[in-house]
Image: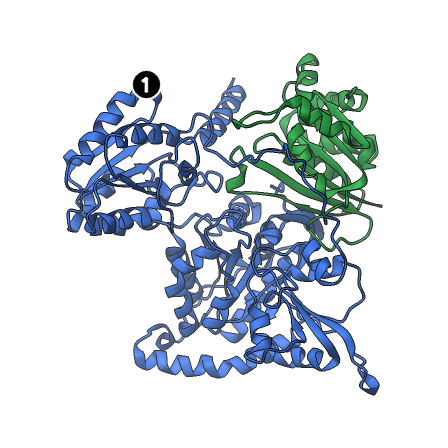
């Protein structure tokens, strides 16, 4: 992470795409960032947490419990006239879809940017959904930077535009932008924050049907304006077309986001329409189509532009992911884009002896001991099923543990175990991490308690959000109280320390609770080995200083 | 000038600190830089890589095309082989020769050495051993960087200066250890 210093001269910094976004937001007068950690978006909030200006100004940057609470808090800040940023990974947008879509109906007061980092090729995710569809669906303008400098510059533009049109702006990046560094020129000094301003029209913010209908008409009518804005946006670049004498260019390109870079990498001199602001400006697209025999559409993610351009008319002249010129799924590479443009990739082979090296739970990780104990007990049953969740412990699916039978979305372990139990399965076990439990597991546990479902819930508590690098976990020190509060019986609520020496105790408790036909919660608690190492090191350094 | 570098190894081996030093040196030279990293799930003991591109001209793609990397710097010998499809025909491989075995089906190390020996330009060094022998146990990765210096086309002095600024916060002892490690790598004898 970049050392933070306050300077008055214009500066250049070597920044990750995520860090460029964070710096851009701070320099645009941000008053609060709200987020739940999720790869590849996590570093935005982390950067703001450590930034000197942000600290000095008291910019809000604490982690939220989930994306929905984050989105709503950001909307509340915008209502008060201040600039707010909410960050998440693509699947997080599903979690906050309700406030996100409805934020188009309320509109905004202070600028509101919803930053979503998509993960095509699923480096660290369950699906490769493309957030641009959400932008269109919610009728919101969407920005998509193609490099780190543009990501930085766009933050100021996005906040201004949000305030100009009184709508949130969706900003979409993808893994390679989020997690790639480049030199970025940044402003000499940050813009002041907006002042507190209660003047927003209250009727817009109360989405009773009568108000919502009025707003729906307004936002629908605004769409033509948004499209015109996109056509005139400095981030959308149309090529110089000289279709004089009716002679068409043989091939034109529509490239969005980082797809643009891969086209540029080929060095070919082609007419390129670069798209970085939506709604898709149909005027610019038509001009390109009219001037070219064929058009190749190069976009990172799903064929969002391509489907709009093709419509139902199966033109042979519009090429892309739907016609096989580019792979239908997965992220783009300079190789596949080069091949689509007639440059054969120099594909060599990996020597056969090279073995796969999948990620695994760290040596010394408490989740390992939890799975060892669970597997030992479950051997005694005919058809046990273990419903997993999202986090490091999802790696328990892999050898040597092969311990979980499902992993769908945040919190699904508890509710799926309940559904399976309702269907007649026994024993049904849910395993969920501490941060995932407070993110989306608590409501499911209440369902289970209310019906006294025959399930055993293991909240594997490592005191952190480990998978994303060890961020604070919202429920630390509160889990027993939360479970009691939701109605879990005291005698079926256990805390254990997952260490090999405690195996007899842990297995005995698991066995006993599997055989209890109601809701039990077992909380194995031991700090994540990674954060433990970090904390021990910091403690040693502190002690050295004090000596 | 333009140098495309693949840094690779196993999660936790410290490839990103090598990238930081090269990045700092390149930035001090006012070169363009793109460095794509891997964060998240794959960092947990799996194979990791970073694409680092430095150039005197603007760089378009964050990713290096196949067959175009000038240098592979690997903290682990089998991991060096994993990225061979990215290496240009005349490219260099600079790798640690010490295997990191955390999988049950790790191949025979002699077979790995034989594969490496087929390449035109390879430097394989037991950096872990060198680091221990020279009392810089935590700077094995910087020894590797020293060994890669010529292939990278960055002046030795520039790398040294970059080490000074990158490690400045951590105190003089750590700066000195890393500068010593860089020198050991430069002189180091590979296979």
Residue at the image position 66 percent from the left and 57 percent from the top: A147
Relative image position of residue A123 (x, y in whole percent): 53, 47
Relative image position of residue A354 (x, y in whole percent): 62, 33
Q: Which residue is mark 1?
A: A501
Can you tell which quarter of the image residue A217 is in? bottom left
Label 1 chain ID: A
Taking the image as shown, residue A419 lies to the left or right of residue B177, namely: left
* Residue A287, above or below A511: below
* Residue A312, above or below B159: below
* Badge 1: residue crowd in 10 Å (few <14, some 14–19, many ≥20): few
Who's blue, chain-wise? A
What is chain B's hue in the picture? green
Taking the image as shown, residue B151 lies to the left or right of residue A312, namely: right
In this view, the residue in front, B87 or A526, is B87
Relative image position of residue A466 (x, y in whole percent): 44, 38
Residue at the image position 56 percent from the left and 36 percent from the top: A356
* Residue A506, above or below A128: above
In this view, the residue in front, A439 or A312, is A312
Can you tell which quarter of the image residue B50 is in? top right
Examine the rendering and report whether any part of residue B52 can be seen.
Answer: yes
In this view, the residue in front, A293 or A477, is A293
């Amino acid at each position: 992470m970049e050392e933070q210093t306050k300077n008055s001269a214009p500066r250049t910094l070597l920044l990750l795409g995520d860090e460029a976004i964070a710096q851009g937001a701070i320099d645009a007068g941000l008053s609060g960032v709200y987020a739940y950690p999720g790869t590849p978006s996590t570093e935005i909030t982390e950067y703001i947490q450590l930034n000197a200006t942000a600290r000095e100004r008291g910019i809000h940057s604490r982690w939220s419990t989930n994306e929905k609470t984050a989105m709503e808090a950001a909307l509340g800040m915008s209502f008060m006239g201040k600039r707010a940023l909410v960050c998440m990974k693509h699947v997080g947008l599903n979690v906050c879809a309700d406030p996100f879509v409805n934020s188009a109906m309320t509109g905004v007061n202070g600028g509101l940017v919803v930053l979503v980092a998509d993960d095509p090729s699923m480096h660290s995710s369950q699906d490769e959904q493309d957030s641009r569809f959400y932008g269109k669906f919610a009728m919101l303008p969407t920005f998509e930077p193609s490099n780190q400098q543009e990501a930085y510059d766009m933050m100021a533009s996005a906040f201004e535009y949000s305030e100009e049109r009184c709508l949130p702006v969706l900003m979409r990046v993808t893994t390679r932008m989020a997690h790639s560094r480049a030199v970025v020129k940044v402003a000499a000094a940050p813009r002041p924050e907006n002042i507190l301003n209660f003047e927003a029209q209250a009727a817009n913010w109360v989405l009773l049907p009568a108000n919502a209908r009025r707003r729906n008409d307004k936002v629908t009518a605004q769409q033509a304006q948004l499209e015109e804005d996109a056509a005139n946006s400095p981030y959308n670049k149309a090529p110089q077309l000289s279709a004089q004498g009716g002679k068409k260019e043989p091939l034109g390109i529509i490239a969005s986001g980082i797809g643009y870079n891969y086209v540029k990498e080929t060095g070919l001199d082609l007419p390129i329409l670069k798209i970085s602001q939506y709604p898709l400006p149909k005027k610019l697209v038509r001009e390109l189509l009219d001037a070219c025999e064929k058009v190749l559409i190069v976009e990172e993610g799903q064929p969002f532009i391509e489907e709009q351009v093709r419509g139902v008319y199966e033109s042979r002249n519009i090429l892309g992911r739907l016609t096989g010129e580019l792979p239908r799924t997965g992220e783009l590479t300079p190789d596949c884009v080069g091949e689509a443009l007639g440059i054969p990739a120099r594909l060599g082979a990996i020597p056969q002896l090279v073995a796969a090296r999948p990620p695994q739970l760290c040596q010394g990780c408490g989740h390992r001991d939890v799975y060892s104990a669970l597997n030992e007990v479950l051997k005694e049953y005919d058809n046990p099923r273990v419903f997993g969740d999202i986090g490091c412990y999802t790696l328990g699916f892999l050898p040597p543990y092969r311990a979980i039978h499902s992993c769908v979305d945040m919190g699904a372990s508890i509710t799926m175990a309940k559904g399976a139990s309702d269907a007649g399965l026994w024993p049904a076990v849910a395993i969920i991490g501490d941060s995932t439990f407070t993110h989306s597991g608590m409501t499911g546990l209440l369902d289970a308690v209310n019906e006294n479902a025959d399930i055993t819930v293991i909240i594997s508590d490592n005191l952190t959000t480990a998978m994303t690098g060890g961020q604070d976990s919202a429920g630390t020190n509160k889990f027993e109280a939360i479970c009691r509060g939701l109605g879990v019986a005291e005698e079926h609520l256990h805390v254990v320390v997952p260490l090999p020496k405690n195996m007899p105790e842990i297995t005995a408790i698991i066995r006993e609770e599997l055989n209890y036909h109601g809701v039990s919660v077992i909380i194995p608690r031991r700090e994540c080995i990674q954060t433990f190492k970090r904390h021990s090191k910091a403690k040693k350094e502190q002690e050295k200083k004090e000596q | 000038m333009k140098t495309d570098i693949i840094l690779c190894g196993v999660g936790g081996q410290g490839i990103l600190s090598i990238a930081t030093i090269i990045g700092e040196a390149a930035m001090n030279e006012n070169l363009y830089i793109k460095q794509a990293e891997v964060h998240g799930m794959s960092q947990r003991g799996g194979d990791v890589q970073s694409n680092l591109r430095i150039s005197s001209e603007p760089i378009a793609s964050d990713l290096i095309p196949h067959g175009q990397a000038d240098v592979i710097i690997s903290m682990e010998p089998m991991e060096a082989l994993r990225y061979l499809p990215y290496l240009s025909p005349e490219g260099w491989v600079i790798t640690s020769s010490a295997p990191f075995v955390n999988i049950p089906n790790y191949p025979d190390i002699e077979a790995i050495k034989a594969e490496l020996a087929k390449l035109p330009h390879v430097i394989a060094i037991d950096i872990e051993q060198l680091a221990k022998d020279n009392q810089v146990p935590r700077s094995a990765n910087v020894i590797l960087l020293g060994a890669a210096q010529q292939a990278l086309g960055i002046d030795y002095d520039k790398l040294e200066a970059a080490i000074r600024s990158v490690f400045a916060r951590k105190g003089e002892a750590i700066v000195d250890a890393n500068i010593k490690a860089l020198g050991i790598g430069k002189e180091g004898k590979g296979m």
